[in-house]
Amino acid sequence: MRIHSIFVGALLLAAGLASSALAIFATKDPVEPVPVERLARNAATYLAAHPNDADAHYILGRIHYLAFASRREEIMAYDSGAKDGGKPEPWRGKMGAGDGANMPKAEMVAHAAKAHEELEAAVRMEPGNPLYWLGLASFLEEFSKWEAQTKPENLPAALRSSPYTRCRVFYFNATGPAVLYTV
């Protein structure tokens, strides 16, 4: 009888936890395509009010990175961050390379330069955050592939210094010291 009561109690607890987890996911705003210009403006406004918020730098960098990688004028974002005054929150799901091959190289370079600047700022502010290192490394890897294919002119100095080699180091930094001691 006692084992039966414990079993029923465990089932009820599991059901309660599962419904709580589902409620959390159900209340998350849906993602929708939002103009990069609006997301970047909202993120820059938020960053101006919170200049020491590493996550704000990361978010602004990610917005420009997604615009660069997708070659689109709109990227997916959560509804709440798309509204004026809200802290933008780009979607963290898969978003394939865009068909926006018509995005001018100058605009691609501008997005790349801003992504690089803001992602590096996030890493400088919180060097122990692996998400920031991964974001920067991923961006540099994507940029180096694009640069090799398109050979753009007038790159900012920070983007001319072997980004592919640097991205490998940054991937390593993201894994932290734990990797040093595993075989």
Image (cartoon, rainbow, N blue to C red):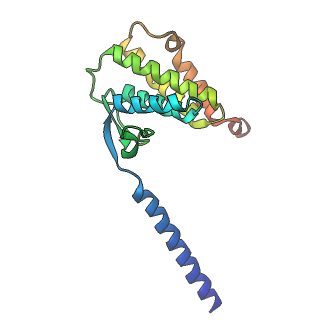
Q: Position of residue 122 (x, y in %)?
A: 57, 29
Q: Is residue 88 above or below residue 40?
A: below
Against 110, is 19 above or below? below
Tell me the quarter of the picture where residue 6 sits.
bottom right
Residue drawn at x 46%, y 21% is 114
- Residue nearer the viewer, 87 or 136: 87
Q: Tell how many labels.
A: 0
- Expressed as whole percent of the image width and height from the top left, the position of residue 67 reads 37, 28
Tell me if 73 is positioned left or right of 12 in this view.
Answer: left
Q: Where, by quadrant of the figure, is residue 121 drawn?
A: top right
State which quarter of the image contains the N terminus: bottom right
Task: Name the spot of residue 4 as percent of width and height, x first.
Answer: 59, 88
Q: Is residue 82 left or right of residue 4?
A: left
Side of 167 where 75 appears, left or right = left
Q: Which residue is at a point 46% across and 68% down the rendered structure image?
A: 19
Q: Quadrant of the C terminus?
A: top right
Query: How far across and down, in percent of the image, does residue 8 sit?
Result: 55, 83
Q: Residue at x 50, y 11 (%)?
A: 160
Foreground of the two, 101 or 78: 78
| Residue 125 visible, this orientation | yes
* Outermost bottom residue: 1
Q: Is residue 144 visible?
A: no
Relative height, residue 178 to residue 124 (above, below): below
Residue sitting farthest toward the top: 154
